[in-house]
């Protein structure tokens, strides 16, 4: 909408910030991006998300919204061009279901791979692989979860193909097995080939170094 003020508060290494970048780019929405320093959080962030004090936060015409899934739905409802949620009510409900599955089942296990060591880490990796296999069943033979074009579930889960690979390397585990989830593995490649997705990815070596530091700090007290 002409004259709108759209601001995104985020962090360069956050896959949840990436989700919002992708949605805004797909919608061709102009916005300002503000990088946050977690050691010195901005006044705008603290005022915009006083409950969690986390990114991403979308500020539209002075009104803030937090939590990436909430933000994605708001973006889709506010800017009607290039819809990311299906128009059919049943298909829209299914997209929300699988997005919640990613959030509730895939994200926690991938995070656990980064915060645990030993058997706990291996269990988290096994659970992550099982959940990715279930996610693959929803994809089937489609190029994208949204069909021929990127949609809601693609935006919600697409980061795994990039951040997940780095998690594998840093934590020394196998998460994305091309032999057991070939369709999902191909889908990760398709997602990362989309130009607006690729241009919003953080530099791999920079993200790898950052992830190594996070892993060392997170697992310092683990055995």
Image (spheres, grey):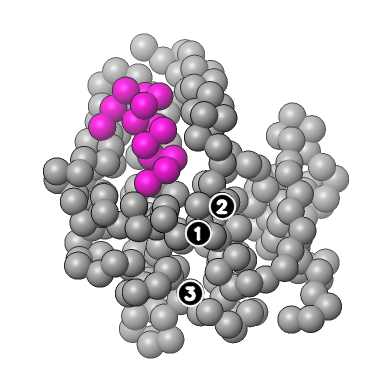
- Where is mark 3, residue-wise? 84
Residue 161: x, y in percent? 37, 46
Q: Earlier in the sequence, mark 3 or mark 1?
A: 3
Prevailing secondary structure of the magenta residues: helix
Residue farthest bottom in this picture: 88
* Residue depicted at x 30% and y 34%: 124
Q: Which secondary structure, mark 1?
A: helix
Within-10-Å neighbours for mark 2: few <14, some 14–19, many 20+: few
Q: CA distance from mark 2 to mark 3?
A: 19 Å
- Quarter containing the N terminus: bottom right
Q: Residues within 10 Å of mark 3 (few under 14, many from 20)?
A: many
Q: Residue at x 44, y 49 (%)?
A: 159
Say whether marks 1 and 2 touch (CB < 8 Å): yes
Q: Position of residue 121 (x, y in %)?
A: 31, 26
| Quadrant in which residue 110 is drawn | top left
Q: Quadrant of residue 42?
A: top right
Instruction: Please state the horizontal and vertical placement of residue 136, each as a whole percent of the image.
Output: 23, 58
Question: Gap between marks 1 and 2, in whole Å?
Answer: 6 Å
Write the residue at 49% across / 17% down.
216
Of residues 169 and 152, the one drawn nearer to the viewer in this rendering: 169
Disc ID at residue 195: 1
Relative to 163, is 183 above or below?
Answer: below
Who is closer to the viewer here, 192 or 163? 192
Write down the residue under mark 2: 199
Magenta stretch in the rendered image: 161-174
Pointer 2 with pointer 3, Cβ within 8 A? no
């Amino acid at each position: 909408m002409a004259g709108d003020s759209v601001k995104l508060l985020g962090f360069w290494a956050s896959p949840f910030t990436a989700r919002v970048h992708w949605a805004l780019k797909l919608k061709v929405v102009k916005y300002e991006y503000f990088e946050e320093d977690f050691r010195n959080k901005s006044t705008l962030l603290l005022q915009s998300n006083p409950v969690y004090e986390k990114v991403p936060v979308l500020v539209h015409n002075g009104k803030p919204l937090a939590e990436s899934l909430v933000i994605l739905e708001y973006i889709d409802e506010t800017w009607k061009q290039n819809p990311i949620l299906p128009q059919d009510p049943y298909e829209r409900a299914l997209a929300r279901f699988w997005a919640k599955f990613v959030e509730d089942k895939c994200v926690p296990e991938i995070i656990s791979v980064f915060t645990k060591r030993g058997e706990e880490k291996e269990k988290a990796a096994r659970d992550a692989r099982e959940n990715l296999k279930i996610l693959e069943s929803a994809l089937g033979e489609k190029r994208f979860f949204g069909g021929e074009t990127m949609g809601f579930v693609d935006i919600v889960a697409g980061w795994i193909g990039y951040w997940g690979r780095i998690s594998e390397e840093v934590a020394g585990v196998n998460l994305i097995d091309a032999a057991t989830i070939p369709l999902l593995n191909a889908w990760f490649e398709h997602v990362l080939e989309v130009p607006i997705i690729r241009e919003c990815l953080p530099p791999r070596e920079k993200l790898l170094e950052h992830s190594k530091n996070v892993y060392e700090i997170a697992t310092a007290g683990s055995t």
